[in-house]
Image (cartoon, helix red, strand yellow):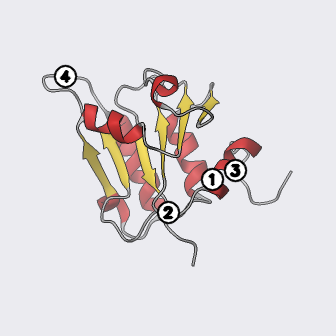
Amino acid sequence: MLKGIPAILSPDLLKALCEMGHSDRLVISDGNFPAQSLGKKGTVIRMDGHGVPEILDGILKVFPLDTYVDKPVTLMEKAPGDEAETPVWDQVAEIVARYDPRGAKTVGHRERFAFYEEAGKAYLIIATSEQALYANVMLQKGVVT
């Protein structure tokens, strides 16, 4: 065990986060996301039993967001005509604001299929048991100064 590391961050996840470089991206996906289909071999870490907000909070304690882009945090947009409620979006904005001085302004949105395309290029996809709809979050890594 280590001091100061959130317990939710497994050794495999910490290893992957450490291996990532500037501008690499990771996705924290909800339970409906096609993580196994989109993830390259060896780039999906399962975190069943956990939700997106708690994992995001743990990751942002150790993971710098990219300061060279305006929106290093991306949420998947709702499909046109979908009336689903998305309270998880507010949770994501609150968590991000705790760790990045730019606050919720760092959070952007991407059309659903464009999000899938970008997720397929991500360094890592974290598959969760999150039941909230449209709870998929993509983070772009920054640098530690």
Q: Which residue is mark 2?
A: 99
Q: Please identify, in this view, whether the residue under mark 2 or under mark 3 is nearer the observer.
A: 3
Q: Amino acid at mark 1?
A: Leu
Position of residue 8 measured from the top left corner of the image (x, y, whole percent): 69, 42
Of the residues shown, which amino acid type is indicated by label 4?
Answer: Asp
Read off the residue under disc 4. Answer: 82
Asked if residue 2 is positioned above or below residue 145 in the image, the reply reads above
Q: Position of residue 143 (x, y in %)?
A: 53, 70
Q: Does the image show residue 10?
A: no
Q: Classify mark 4: helix, strand or loop.
A: loop
Label 3 belongs to which residue? 14
For the point 65% across and 49% down, the residue is: 16
Label 4 environment density (alpha carbons within 10 Å; few <14, some 14–19, many ≥20): few
Residue matched to label 1: 17
Of the image marks 2 and 4, the number of the one nearer the N terminus: 4
* Secondary structure under the numbered disc 3 in the rendered image: helix
**How far is the residue under mark 2 from the one under mark 3?**
18 Å
Graded by Cα atoms within 10 Å as few (under 14), some (14 to 19) or many (20 or more), the crowding at tag 2 reads: some
Q: Residue furthest front?
A: 41
Residue 100 is left or right of residue 71, and the answer is right
Please identify the quarter of the rendering in which residue 50 is found: top right
Q: Please, what secondary structure does the residue beneath circle 1 have? A: helix
- Mark closer to the chain start, 2 or 3: 3
Q: Quick one: label 1, few (<14), some, or many (20+) residues within 10 Å? A: many
Asked whether 102 or 27 is in front, the reply is: 27
Tell me the distance, in whole angstroms, between the alpha carbons under discs 2 and 4: 31 Å
Name the amino acid type tagged 3: Leu
Rendered residue at 37%/71% (across/down): 68
Choose the circle earlier in sequence order: 1 or 2: 1
Instruction: Name the image quarter holding the C terminus.
Output: bottom right
Q: Taking 136 as reference, is 58 above or below it?
A: below
Picture quadrant of residue 61: bottom right
